[in-house]
Image: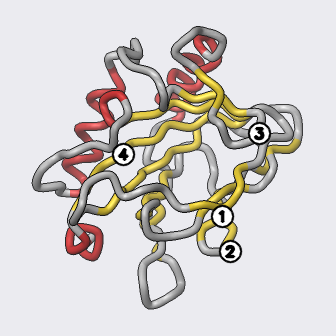
Amino acid sequence: MIILSRSCVKKYKIFKNFLAEKECIDLNKWILDNKNKSFFKDAGMNGKRVTTRYSENVPFPKYIFSIKKKLINMLQLPEVKHPPFYKGMVAGYASVGDTLYVHKDPIWEEGLKTLHCNVVLSDSEGGFPIIENEILKIKKGDMWCYLVSDVHHGCSAVTGKIPRTMWVFGFLIKADIYDRL
């Protein structure tokens, strides 16, 4: 199921159950098994979060590339350009108590927007995305896509006992591509 934001301008698009339960379990396990390795680094967001965003040559699981291809085909991206993180993907681990302050990401290439398609992999409490002051009630397996270079975004505090794990697929696209998603 696809859900659009309530405003006239699409701030985000949600794809319910983008990943199957097994895919979430496998990717969540990969993050939990690797979060203490050197390719996971502090996110630099004044929180309790580590990420692969700042690393090169991350040994991502091979099956993530077929998921990425499925996403590219689903979004009908005519060409694939990535933000400057390894293979255009980021794995993230946010401990209980982590939050993400509201910000915008940079424009990496003139004339292109930065699109992130994020998928929650764990059953954490809290850690909900906030886009332009709107809290999205995302569940495990759901994906939300939005132009991180255009909208203010962050996330609420991770609460409960389960950390939040997520996967980010990043693309550099022309504005008209986003308008037709």
| Quadrant of the image containing the C terminus | bottom left
Specify whether 73 is left or right of 67.
Answer: left
Specify whether 142 is left or right of 94.
Answer: left
Residue type indicated by callout 2? Asn
Tell me the CA gap for discs 1 and 3: 16 Å
Residue type indicated by callout 4? Gly
| Residue sitting nearer the eye, 6 or 81 | 81
Q: Which label sits in the foreground, 1 or 3?
A: 3
Residue type indicated by callout 3? Gly
Residue position for label 2: 133
In the displayed structure, would residue 17 be above or below residue 53?
below
Of callouts 1 and 3, the N-terminal one: 3
Tell me the CA gap for discs 4 and 2: 22 Å
In the displayed structure, would residue 147 be above or below residue 143?
below
Q: Which label sits in the foreground, 3 or 2?
A: 3
CB under 8 Å between callouts 1 and 4? Answer: no
Specify whether 23 is left or right of 162.
Answer: left
Residue position for label 1: 130
Q: Residue 178 is drawn in which quadrant?
A: bottom left
Check disc 3: other Cα within 10 Å, few if <14, some if 14-19, many if 20+: some
Q: Which mark is residue 170?
A: 4
Q: Seen from this angle, which residue lies furthest front? A: 110
Secondary structure beneath label 2: loop
